[in-house]
Amino acid sequence: MADLRLPTNSIVHPDKDRFLSEVNPFEAMMARFDRAAELLDLEPGIYKVLRNPEKTIIVSIPVMMDSGEVEVFTGIRCLYNTSRGPAKGGIRFAPNVSIDEVKALAAWMTWKCAVVNIPFGGAKGGVICDPLKMSMGELERVTRRYTSAIISTLGPDSDVPAPDVNTNERVMAWVMDTYSMHVGHTVNAVTTGKPVAMGGSLGRREATGRGCMLTTREALAHLGMPMKGATVVVQGFGNVGSIAAELMQAEGCKIIAISDRTGGWVHRKGIDVKHAMAYVQEHTTLEGYGVGEPIANEALLELECDVLLPAALENVITTKNAANIRAKVVCEGANGPTTAGADAILDEKGVFVIPDILANAGGVTVSYFEWVQNRGGYYWSEQVVNDRLKEIMVNAFGEVLKLSSQHKVNMRTASYMLSISRVSMVHKLRGIYA
């Protein structure tokens, strides 16, 4: 059974210990946090508070498998900071879930909610398991037992989960139902990313990809580059990458390469994104797609293009390959696709990076809209959702860009400065309870 240690990285590197430190997600987040805190001249006491998660829960999840055997999985839930409102963050099911990863993602959610100025704190959860090897019944039993194990922290006023890696609206329906059974009445505001029939928001599925498109459009406009005809490479053709590609193509961009875990395809004349999405719908992956030429994921990242959208895994742009990145703009659709060590290399090359806590904040923004709709019992049209998302994302981009210009720092550091200043201000106003 998987354990809680940092997963072994299979990449061979001349300085293995340094490289493993580079790709440790919590250390990467802390490196960015420390830089922003220094520039903000953050008070020592507030610095100590914000550098530590409020609560990390580790639970055992005994589950009766279809075979009749009992398996015990490990579940984690981290509430990083709730000073600005209820904790918000996804639940992921994966064999390589670790405490450091969950803590880092919970911290990123804290900064992400603050940078778009929505009244949530940050959380993240995970179960160490391989959902690809589990039946639907086993997944449901894991979900319900995990939910009951962390139920003391869950609630629309305290901790609101959402889908993440290998989880979806069905999993959120199980979480909501389990919680509701415990409290004795239906509480649809306890999760977001639910089926629309259960109180999910219209536009939620497209929200993260739409946010990537909106921030890319703002970045290109800032750089004086037209959206129409801009060449785009997408690593990760899941929900975020495929929808972002579809929306960018609708704005006039040329999608020249796409990929998933099976590899990628490059076609300089442009890929029909709707056709590729239909192929994945039918075949599950891009394997055998056959449009253009096949390309490995590592090589795809280094293609010459106007916009690179890493929308798959963490740590795909590192000190090993950052010097080879030939994109003018990197829009981080995934969480943590660029290591802290790679930031300086991209800066030197003049690459304009839209950091993850800004670029992919469309998802949590519409999750906030879903929570608001659930609490009010009044539901919005998809057009209203999209219009309000656009307003928030464009405003947030503008605020970060202004801070970046004022302090002569990159967009990532400016994003952290903006979010940390908002969270620290609330801590100063609330004081320390003794």
Image (cartoon, rainbow, N blue to C red):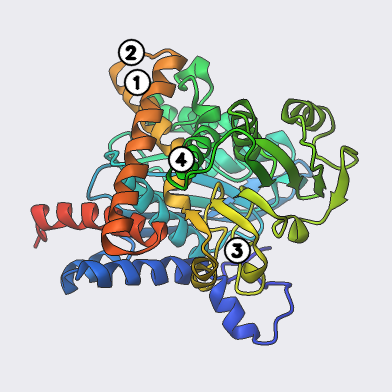
Q: On residue 315, which mark appears?
A: 3
Q: What's the residue type where badge 4 is placed?
A: Ala
Q: Amino acid at mark 1?
A: Gln
* Disc 1 residue crowd, few under 14, some 14–19, many 20+, Cα 10 Å: some
Question: For residue 19, what is the image quadrant?
Answer: bottom right
Residue 402 percent coordinates (x, y) = 29, 50
| Residue found at x 36% / y 32% | 368
**In the displayed structure image, the side of residue 183 where residue 288 appears, left or right:** right
Q: Earlier in the sequence, mark 4 or mark 1?
A: 4
- Which residue carries the number 2 mark? 378
Disc on the earlier residue, 2 or 4: 4
Report if residue 131 is visible in the image.
yes
Q: Amino acid at mark 3?
A: Asn
Question: Which residue is tagged 1?
Answer: 373
Secondary structure beneath dot 4 equals helix
Residue 290 relative to residue 105: left or right: right
- Secondary element at image label 1: helix
Residue type at mark 2 is Tyr
